[in-house]
Image: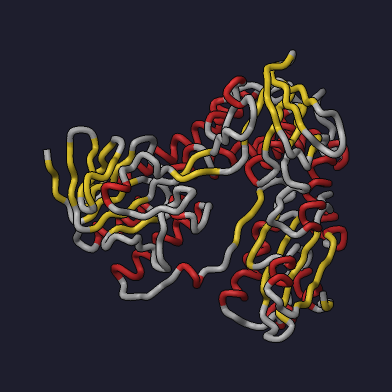
Amino acid sequence: MSQRYDAIVIGTGQAGPALAARLAAAGMKVAILERGKVGGTCVNTGCIPTKTLIASAAVARAAQRAAEFGIATAGAVSVDMKKVKARKDEISGGTSRDNEEWLRGLENVTLVKGHARFESPREVRVGDAVLSAEKIFINVGGRAATPASIGGLGEVPFWTNSSIMEVDFVPPHLVIIGGSYIGLEFAQMYRRFGSAVTVIEMSPRLLAREDPDVSEAIRAIIENEGITVRTNAKCITLEKGPAGVRAGVDCQEGSPRIDGSHLLLAVGRIPNTSDLGLDRAGVRTDPRGYVVVDDQLRTNVENIWALGDCNGRGAFTHTAYNDFEIVAANLLDGDPRRLTDRIETYALFIDPPLGRAGMTETAAKAAGKRILVGKRPMTKVKRAVEKGETQGFMKVVVDADTKQILGAAILGTGGDEVVHTILDVMYARAPYTLIQRAMHIHPTVSELLPTVLGELQPA
């Protein structure tokens, strides 16, 4: 059975549905294909469900600290994980259902459920049907990596960021392999729910892509809540242990064995491209399986684009959506937008959060730039003091020659929101003095940015 369309979109993550709607509004007949739940990683196993769980964990933490604020609670704080999970399921599932209902209601759009595989550069098979189109957009996302280099991984049960979404109890001792963004968010979350937590990281420090001072401050934040951190774990082995799982680590300090009840693997992600039949379409991938794209998301095959996590040009919901905006602007609006125009930005949603934009101090120095750095601890931010959340600091890196902001790290209460003030000025390519001379509201976190920028020092 053959079906003809003007455009085919493979995947319903953040880029796919929005693009399908734009193409349909432009008069195209569009098929959007999905083998799982509508919404992709963000809606089903990523941003929405994890941040919903983090919100529950934050309430638990606030209740545990109530006495510090002069508030008495009736007895010990308890966590009902079945209710926590039910709330997460309702919010995440409701979003997926709403997205599917919206897609099905779009004129000129057909939602097709099933696993898509290329038959040729213009044909995609889903079950018994072969769909053809002149334009095809790949938006298949990624999944958790399970590297064979971890000895014994196949001998013990483990969770990934996806499968842990089904957990409705508090693990007695959660061992997490991976001290980066996903691992740390789950570490703090489950510690606040009541688990003992140990984080194992192969690198010398957590979050190796960040500046050392950021890594050290984040380690202090999570250790302050009772999380055990083991870095420099050069050789990790796994086996069944008396409590459930035993991890063997070759670290410079600490016991060579860690016994836990459950294991979460958070060691990175890989693209969902190995079973798409990309070879039959002639679409090129890199050695890691990411689809190779140019500055406007075009693959090496004419009229095939790749958006979102599968292209290796960003690993976030916001980068995937921006991919859609770039493709739509070029294809439909005559607006020549490019990947290289965007500034890297992201957040680590521990509490307090890290908001990041642009270059790190380390990267700026490595690029040979003359830089100025402004830095202030959150202990100097009255909003943080009032809330009893004084861990972290604010740091801004400025180009000494152009006076433009190169990057920032806001680690502290509200840091994931405050960083946008800096990001917008970076996009405007305005000098740092634009913020330095601004009057901000007191008492807020943002009001310290002019102060930070007024105390720049060579670095």
Across the whole image, how many numbered discs are drawn on residues? Answer: 0
Residue at the image position 64 percent from the left and 21 percent from the top: 169
Q: Give the quarter of the image for residue 77.
A: top right
* 85 up-or-down from 101: above or below: above
| Residue 212 on image: x %, y % | 79, 57
Using the image as rendered, state which of residue 283 and residue 438 is in the foreground: 283
| Residue 373 on image: x %, y % | 79, 73
* 85 up-or-down from 12: above or below: above
Residue at the image position 31 percent from the left and 36 percent from the top: 115
| Residue 122 on image: x %, y % | 21, 52
Farthest residue, direction bottom: 401
Residue 75 located left or right of residue 240? right
Farthest residue, direction top: 242
| Residue 236 on image: x %, y % | 71, 32
Using the image as rendered, state which of residue 238 and residue 260 is in the foreground: 238
Residue 378 located left or right of residue 290? right
Q: Give the quarter of the image for residue 86.
A: top right
Quarter occupied by the C terminus: bottom right
* Residue 126 visible: yes
Residue at the image position 72 percent from the left and 62 percent from the top: 409
* Residue 82 visible: no
Q: Give the quarter of the image for residue 40.
A: top left
Quarter occupied by the N terminus: top left
Is the image coloured rainbow, by chain, by secondary structure, or in one colour?
Answer: secondary structure
Residue at the image position 49 percent from the left and 54 percent from the top: 312
